[in-house]
Amino acid sequence: MNFVTSRTEALSKLNKFIESDISNYNTKRNFDFGVNSRSNVSCLSPYITHRLITEYETAKLVLKKYPFQKVDKFIQEIFWRVYWKGWLELRPKVWTDFIEDLKTIKEDEKYLKAVNGETEIECFNDWVKELKDFNYLHNHTRMLFASIWIFTLGLSWQKGAEFFMRHLHDGDAASNTLSWRWVAGIQTKGKNYLAKSWNISKFTNNKYKNVKLNETALPIVDNREYKISPTQVSKNLDSNEHLIIFENEMNTDFFEHEKYKKIYFVLLGNENRSIKLSKKVMEYKANVVKSRLNEIKYETELLDGNSLMNFTNTSKSFDVIYPCIGENFSFFKMLTKKNNLKVNFIKRKEDEFCWKFSNKGYFNFKSNIPIILSTFKLN
């Protein structure tokens, strides 16, 4: 599998999927045919995670060619990402609790066997290797993997979510964390996702048969409740000369570049991250940012976490493309408090409109997709 790093290449991948492969999606999307046969899914998630392309332009390009009824499953999957992000924005403490939980969970022998692919479950071991080798797993396989991790191997969902974030090119704080919570049975309380032998056999085209699993496990119990919080607002509405962009918001086509003297792109190193990313994931992110620097025709500079700290020691007022709840926002929030920064967050109007529908479950959000599509003329 070859993941590209520039916006131009990502758009090319999207257009190829629309022209050639999307017709298989509705009926074939749940099948994992292996790393050399991925035409039944889009594999666009690394680009959407870094927003080389956005969920909204993806939907618009798809619906330009097909009526909604023919591609409804794909559009719904695209908007799952928007929903998860909005859900976490409204409940940011879920992220901070997850990070705090990780500090108290030990990496015992059982855990080490799992992350090294040394369990007694062949499919699981193969998926561990695939994840490390290709930094990607089929979405249905991720659910099966998480279920085996939690209910058959008896490991914490938090360490599983951390393991995915460490190795996935498309690791996203909202989609990853909340999907693991959903499998565990704490996102929708009392409703867990159980991997079953027949399911694995069917959707891997009979590659794995008679997998011994715990198919009757009860949901994980977590009694913490999370009330909806107000979303982040700007604290500075002055006219600023500098703009900060984090690596998960690479599409800069929705605002005026001309107003800024300089645009700073930020890629946090592992020394500034709670979850330490693998070398390959860090390299991928670095190449994504470098590609974007080459594509933008304005004065730019690449910063890491430490150089951003130094920058904010002297510059106290600037604009920031809102990085969403996760590692980047947590780091920036710490800097804002430490250096008393005056920040103007720039948000996409589409995000702000969609996130208000994330106050309940996805069924409620899904019912509003037609409104979203018509409001922003995506269909």
Image (cartoon, rainbow, N blue to C red):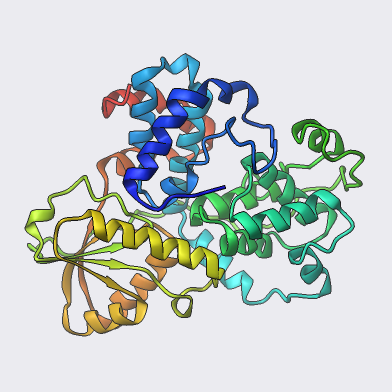
Q: Is residue 341 visible?
A: yes
Please tell me which residue is depicted at 92% across the width and 46% down the height of the picture: 212
> Residue 218: x percent and y percent?
81, 48
Q: Residue 110, percent across and down? A: 83, 69
The total number of labels drawn is 0
Q: Is residue 173 above or below residue 17?
A: below
Position of the C terminus, as image quadrant, is top left
Q: Please indicate whether residue 4 sits to the left or right of residue 140 in the image.
A: left
Q: Is residue 74 above or below residue 178?
A: above
Q: Residue at x 49, y 62 (%)?
A: 93
Left or right? Give the position of 365 relative to 33: left
Q: Where residue 129 sits in the image (x, y, percent)?
A: 72, 58
Q: Is residue 359 among what the camera can see?
A: no
Q: Which residue is at a point 37% across and 49% down the rendered structure image?
A: 51
Look at the picture and state if 317 lies above or below 201: below
Q: Residue at x 42, y 45 (%)?
A: 48
- 157 on left or right of 2: right
Q: Position of residue 120 (x, y in %)?
A: 90, 57
Asked where in the image residue 220 lies, by quadrant, the reply is bottom right
251, 155: nearer the viewer = 251
- Side (left or right) of 236 relative to 181: left
Q: Depth check: give the residue in front, 102 or 124.
A: 124
Residue 19 occupies quadrant: top left
